[in-house]
Image (cartoon, rainbow, N blue to C red):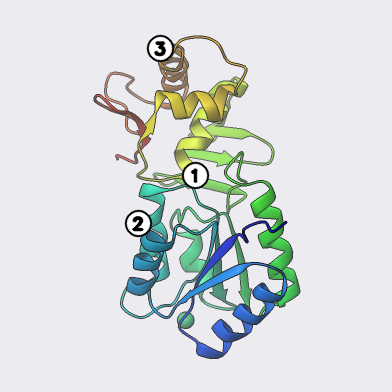
Amino acid sequence: MSVEAQKILVIEDEEKIAAALRAYLENAGYGVITAADGEAGLAAFYETNPDLIVLDLMLPKVPGEVVCGEIRLESRIPIIMLTAKSGEDDKLSGFALGADDYVTKPFSPRELIARIRSLLRRCCDGISPMYKSMSWNGGELEIEFESRTVRKNGTEVSLTPSEFKILSSLVKYPGKVFTRDELIDRALGEDFDGFERTIDSHVKNLRGKIEDDTANPKYVITVRGAGYRFGVRK
Ligand code: CA
């Protein structure tokens, strides 16, 4: 009995690294697709429907952060970012990439495979954020994911578990529009048997806690006829 191998898309321009990753991943039982630049990587993502992406940050044609952003508009596929050891950390912390994990080069293939296994196990469900904390508008709004702390202008605001899950779902996928159904799945869970509009009342309460003007929200944005997305308006 054969089970179809899970497919990993490796987007990496350094041939030696790509070849080594292919060998290690195939040896670990995964199917491997490689792409040598960002443009080819995006094309391969659309064509091959992989289960997970290993994405180098510094890529020719289309850089890794743009590839990541484009994929995130479409998909919650797990993404592991490969970053160079120095210099890129600062750059990384400056924006929300939407990656699920990252390893710095040079990395141990064994460690990378362990992370791939763990991400595939957790696949798509309560994915842990790439950062321990994020902040917007010069610290006006801050989230610490592990402690589930949210601060507005330096003062802790108390969110319900559902409000926190809605907010953290939105911020993990910048630009993505979540339907009410998707937010119910992520924030309220499968046991939830209420109505879609329940999400609206959670959002209303959430806005009351984190927005300056709930009639003109700048973080939790309504997308008419679709749902909600995270935005950062000044
Ligand atoms: Ca590179």
Q: Residue at x 42, y 47 (%)?
A: 138
Screen quadrant of the C terminus:
top left
- Confirm if mark 3 falls within 8 A of ligand 1: no
Residue 182: image location, x then y, percent? 46, 29
Q: Which of pointers 1 and 2 indicates the residue nearer the eye?
A: 2
- Where is 15 relative to 181, above or below? below
**Measured Cα–Cα span from mark 1 to mark 2:** 14 Å
Q: Residue at x 52, y 40 (%)?
A: 142
Secondary structure of residue under mark 2: helix
Residue 80: image location, x then y, percent? 57, 62
44 or 178: nearer the viewer: 44
Which dot marks residue 172?
Answer: 1
Of pointers 1 and 3, the one earlier in the residue sequence: 1
Say whether residue 117 is left or right of residue 44.
right
Q: Residue at x 35, y 73 (%)?
A: 40
Secondary structure of residue under mark 1: helix
Which residue, given by chain and number where applicable, does mark 2 sit on?
A: 70
- Confirm if mark 2 falls within 8 A of ligand 1: no
- Identify which amino acid the numbered label 2 is placed on: Glu
Which dot marks residue 197?
Answer: 3
Residue 188: image location, x then y, percent? 57, 21
- Identify which amino acid the numbered label 3 is placed on: Arg
**Measured Cα–Cα span from mark 1 to mark 3:** 22 Å
197 or 141: nearer the viewer: 197
- Identify which amino acid the numbered label 1 is placed on: Lys
Screen quadrant of the N terminus:
bottom right
Of pointers 1 and 2, the one earlier in the residue sequence: 2
Residue 70: image location, x then y, percent? 35, 56
Say whether residue 171 is left or right of residue 222.
right
64 or 207: nearer the viewer: 64
**Measured Cα–Cα span from mark 2 to mark 3:** 29 Å
